[in-house]
Image (cartoon, grey):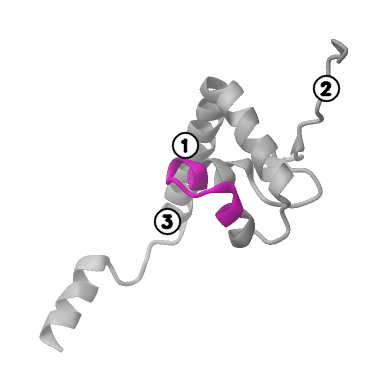
Amino acid sequence: MSNTIINEVIPIYTDTDGRMRIAGTRVLLDLIVEAYRRGETPEHIVQMYTMLTLDQVYLAIGYYLRHRESVNAYIRQMDDEAKALRHEWETKYPPKVIRAELLARLESG
C-alpha cells in the first residue's frame, strides 16, 4: 500500500446570494446540517432530499464536522439576515389579523 494522499472534492458551492449549497442542486447546506443536528441519518436525509446522493450528504456532513465553527457562524448569519428581512417585510406589510385575534376567534367559535 502506498502513502498516496487522496483529495476529495467537497460538493459545496456558494451561490451569488452567498448561500452555501450542495453542488449540482439547490439544496442548502443549512438544511443538511440542521437535519444532521436533529439526529437524522445520512440515508434519511437522502430520502428527504431525493436529488442528493448519499456520498454528497456524507461529504457535506464531513465538511460541517471539520469546519463546525465557521459553518455555525455562517448559519447564524443566515438566520440573522432572515430575521431582519422578515422584520422589514412585516413592518412594510403588517398582518391584518394578529395571532391573539385568531386565537380569540378560535376559542369563541
The answer to whether residue 50 is seen in the rendering is yes
Residue lying furthest bottom: 109
Q: Which mark is residue 7?
A: 2
Residue 61 percent location from the top left of the image: 60, 36
In what quadrant of the picture does the C terminus appear?
bottom left
Q: Residue at x 52, y 32 (%)?
A: 77
Mark 2 surroundings: few (<14), some (14-19) or many (≥20) residues within 10 A = few
Residue 107 percent location from the top left of the image: 12, 81
Q: Is residue 64 left or right of residue 26?
A: left
Can you identify the residue that label 1 sits on? 80
Mark 1 surroundings: few (<14), some (14-19) or many (≥20) residues within 10 A = few
Q: Which mark is residue 90?
A: 3
Q: Which residues are magenta?
A: 34-45
Q: How many marks?
A: 3
Mark 3 surroundings: few (<14), some (14-19) or many (≥20) residues within 10 A = few
Distance in Å between CA atoms under marks 1 and 3: 15 Å
> Residue 40 lies in magenta, yes or no?
yes
Q: Nearer the viewer, mark 1 or mark 3?
A: 1
**Earlier residue among tags 3 and 2:** 2
* Amino acid type of the residue tagged 1 in the rendering: Asp
Distance in Å between CA atoms under marks 1 and 2: 34 Å
Q: Nearer the viewer, mark 1 or mark 2?
A: 2
* Amino acid type of the residue tagged 3 in the rendering: Glu
